[in-house]
Every structure is written in C-alpha cells, then in structure tokens.
Amino acid sequence: MKYSILFIVAFFVGNMSNEDAKSWSEGQKLSWSDFKGNPDPTSDAVALTASGITFGYSLKTSGKRIVDYRTTVEAHFYPNKSWYVKSRGNHHVLRHEQLHFDITELYARQFRQQLTKLVVNQNLKEQMRSLHDSVNKALNETQIRYDKQTNHSMNIEKQKAWELFVAKELKALDQFKSH
C-alpha cells in the first residue's frame, strides 16, 4: 500500500504564522508583559486580547481512499496583537483578559472532543472544515456575549459568574485540554 500525507493549517485570527504566539497552559496565566501591541487610541477599551484556535490535520490515504487522520488544535494568544493602556490596566482587568484566553481554550477543547467523534470517510476534510467554522463562529459569539454581559469587566457580579462558568466547563472537558 502506498500512503500519502496532506497537512493543512487554518488560523482563526488571520494569518499570524510569522508572529509569536503563546499557547494556552493551565499553569501559566497571562501577565501585562505579554501584551506587546500598541493601544488603539480610538478605543475606549482598557485592553484587548487577541487569541484564536489554530487547527491542522494530516490524512493517511491508500490510493485515493482516506484510511486515517490526525489533528492538532491549539489555543493561542498573540502578544503583538494584544494591548493594554498602562495607566488603566489593573489586576481585575487582567483577569478579564485571561478569561478571554480561557474561553478560547474552552472552545479548543470542544473542538478536540468533536474531532474524536468523526468516523473516517471520504468526506472527512469537509466535516473537519465545517466543525472548525462552527467552533470559530461559536467562539466569537461567546467572546462578544462575555464582554457584553460583564460590561468589559465592569460588572463584578457577572465577571465572577463567567469565571465560575468557564472554570466548570474547562474541568468538564479536562481530558481534552492543551498539553
């Protein structure tokens, strides 16, 4: 049997392949020194976290038939696209920004879980693309909802509720966490 390998990488936050990225890690939280971008002078925001999911896969084929696959899914933080206003950044705002990154990891875990349920067939590439698109759409909607409900961290009660919710969801998907 002759096997061929195909590898594709898709990025959620544009093409950042030439940029440093920090992978999500359970034991390593963001610090203000990770935010290396220049603040947007037209924005009322105190900080912006650029994060996204990178996805790659390889297919094992026999002739023209797909016989196996492997995937990689990572939650990344992009320091050069992330910024904060030094005079207004504090621990509370940093925790809010960390939760944006944690939400990205949550969706990376959900994506990994969904990928394990796929059955090898000739539509595998389209199924993975579709899953990737739907995860990114849901991630974006959740990030927007998080900012809206917490009023960008100003609503302390909602901020705490989101922190508890995300921690619970991450724990439920612990077997799919980034390594």
Image: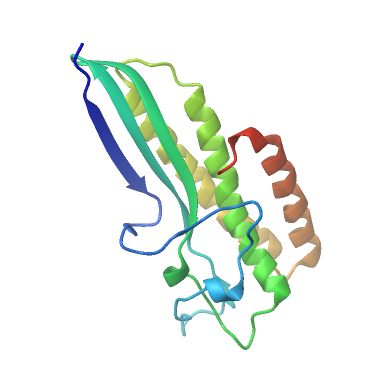
Q: Position of residue 90 (x, y in %)?
A: 69, 78
The residue depicted at 59 percent of the width and 85 percent of the height is 86
Is residue 46 toward the left or the right of residue 19 in the image?
A: right
The colour mode here is rainbow
Q: Position of residue 174 (x, y in %)?
A: 66, 37
Where 172 sits versus 41, above or below? Answer: above
Is residue 91 toward the left or the right of residue 10 in the image?
A: right
Rendering quarter of residue 128: top left
The residue depicted at 69 percent of the width and 48 percent of the height is 166
Is residue 43 toward the left or the right of residue 172 in the image?
A: left
**Please, which residue is most extreme toward the front here?**
1
**Please, which residue is most extreme toward the top here?**
1
Q: Position of residue 38 (x, y in %)?
A: 45, 81
Which of the two residues, 80 or 133, is positioned nearer the viewer here? 80
Residue 42 visible to an observer of this rendering: yes
Q: Quadrant of the N terminus?
A: top left
Residue 142 visible to an observer of this rendering: no
Q: Position of residue 96 (x, y in %)?
A: 67, 65
Is residue 138 toward the left or the right of residue 172 in the image?
A: left
